[in-house]
Amino acid sequence: EARRRAAERSRTRADDRYVFHSWSAQGAIDPLPVAGGEGAWFWDEDGNRYLDFASQLVNLNLGHQHPRLVAALQAQAGRLATVGPTFASDVRGELARLIAERAPGSRGAAGTDGAAGAAAGDDRRWRVFFTNGGADAVENAVRLARLHTGRAKVLSAYRSYHGNTTTAISLTGDPRRWPNEVSPDPHVRHFLGPYAYRSAFGARDDAEEGERALAHLREVVQLEGPGTVAAILLETIVGTNGVLIPPDGYLEGVRELCDEHGILLVTDEVMVGFGRVGEWFAVDRWGVVPDLVTFAKGVNSGYVPLGGVIIGEHVARTFDDRVFPGGLTYSGHPLACAVGVESVRTFEDERILDRVRTLGADVVGPRLREIADRHPSVGEVRGLGFFWAVELVRDRATREPLVPFNASGAAAAPMGAVVAAVKERGVWPFVHFNRLHVAPPLVTSAEDLEHGLAAIDEALDVADGYAGV
Ligand code: PLP
């Protein structure tokens, strides 16, 4: 009773009265008051504990309160808590070096298998422009591409999310763009990327989907006018819109298409970079080297806001004598960069990339496939490393989604019931449309992974109830 009253008090406190929350009708939300966290777990003010299968917003890669990250943050705060972007900063420089050395095509990107190994010897040179998060990373990548090519147009995919500033939300290919089209970037065009399970191209398998999606993109470029396109920007693996892994050959084909027409390839690695799929950058899986790479989230697990653009030297050189007309007061903030430096070192000392690959392949993937076999409501599971989607359907044969596209209110109730059942079991999932995503912190133990997946297994009985059985 005391706990209930305490919770009641906290919910009606300052947050409720004064905070204006993201993506919400302010009267329709009741945010959970979080009191603390450790590793893959957090707890509310009632003492209810949750296993964080969403890594907050898929950014908490090293988990809550990692002692090394907290210590690095405290040490930097004691040393120099802030410094302007016009000055040089040791931690900013060090983080830029660590990132450049691990960027696609650099020596440090090795440790990957297959085609990526071939690119690993290139030692491509990179520079890093730091931003406050992902949206402004995208914004500045597009600025760089436009100024470098002298072209305005940028192509991005339907079923994508790129952030919530003007150009980034215009590039976004999901319904969050629609209400923002009152003031869009006028030079954005969308295309369809590969999505074999719901192929727009009538493809029967992954390989065919990749080929047809590439042919479609080639045609879009042709019809838009290749000489008018500054960049093709895509999420290397589509994140929020479905954990869509490009079939082998697709990204290689997009790279070739860009090269044919002097178009820059920008890969948005905000969600999948820094270990989410067991690579520094997801694009390393295919050995493709983009011209620009955006990052944020996992770079320092979000302990202090940080993002940026990794800029190929050939693009950076455009601004050797010409002024780059962009900047941010907090570009490369020392508190954020100090945590970033410690995070890269921790990844290596704790062998995070290896554990994500191994546990993803040996624990998460097999258990999710077993779950898919048991539950008629599961249409498909797909993913890599610590990044998976469970796509829920009413009917496996027709693939009718458990809830309609962009459903809200009563139409979304079946998903609401499934999510409530997962949360009742002390697991916090990531949810989008008719999908549960499994995206735990990269430090989650095998036992905790099993625990969270068992909760999803049980909760899917609720989904089965809607699946006509
Ligand atoms: N790009 C991708 C792929 C993302 O997933 C996100 C955020 O979820 C963003 C960009 C925007 O990042 P931020 O919210 O830090 O602005």
Image (cartoon, rainbow, N blue to C red):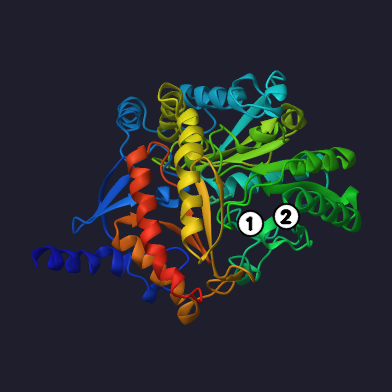
Instruction: Give the number of the disc on residue 367.
Output: none
162 or 143, nearer to the observer: 162
Q: Which residue is mark 2?
A: 193
Q: Nearer the viewer, mark 1 or mark 2?
A: 2
Task: Kindly state the secondary structure of the residue where label 2 is placed.
Answer: loop
* Residue name at image x 89 percent, y 39 percent: 260
- Does ligand 1 reach within 8 Å of label 1's beta carbon? yes
Q: Which residue is mark 1?
A: 160
Quadrant of the rendering where the N terminus is positioned = bottom left
Farthest residue toward the left?
Answer: 2
Q: Is residue 238 left or right of residue 346?
A: right
Label 1 sits on what residue type? Ser
Q: Quadrant of residue 105?
A: top right
Is residue 238 positioned above or below 357 on the image? below
- Residues at circles 1 and 2 in contact by the CB criterion of under 8 Å: yes
Whether residue 52 is visible here, answered yes or no, is no
Q: Position of residue 202 (x, y in %)?
A: 78, 62
**Callout 2 crowding tier (Cα within 10 Å): few <14, some 14–19, many ≥20:** many
Q: Quadrant of residue 419?
A: bottom left
Q: Is residue 78 left or right of residue 439?
A: left
- Compute the Cα span from label 1 to label 2: 9 Å
* Residue name at image x 72 percent, y 54 percent: 194
386 or 330, nearer to the observer: 386
Whether residue 66 is visible here, answered yes or no, is yes
Label 2 sits on what residue type? Gly
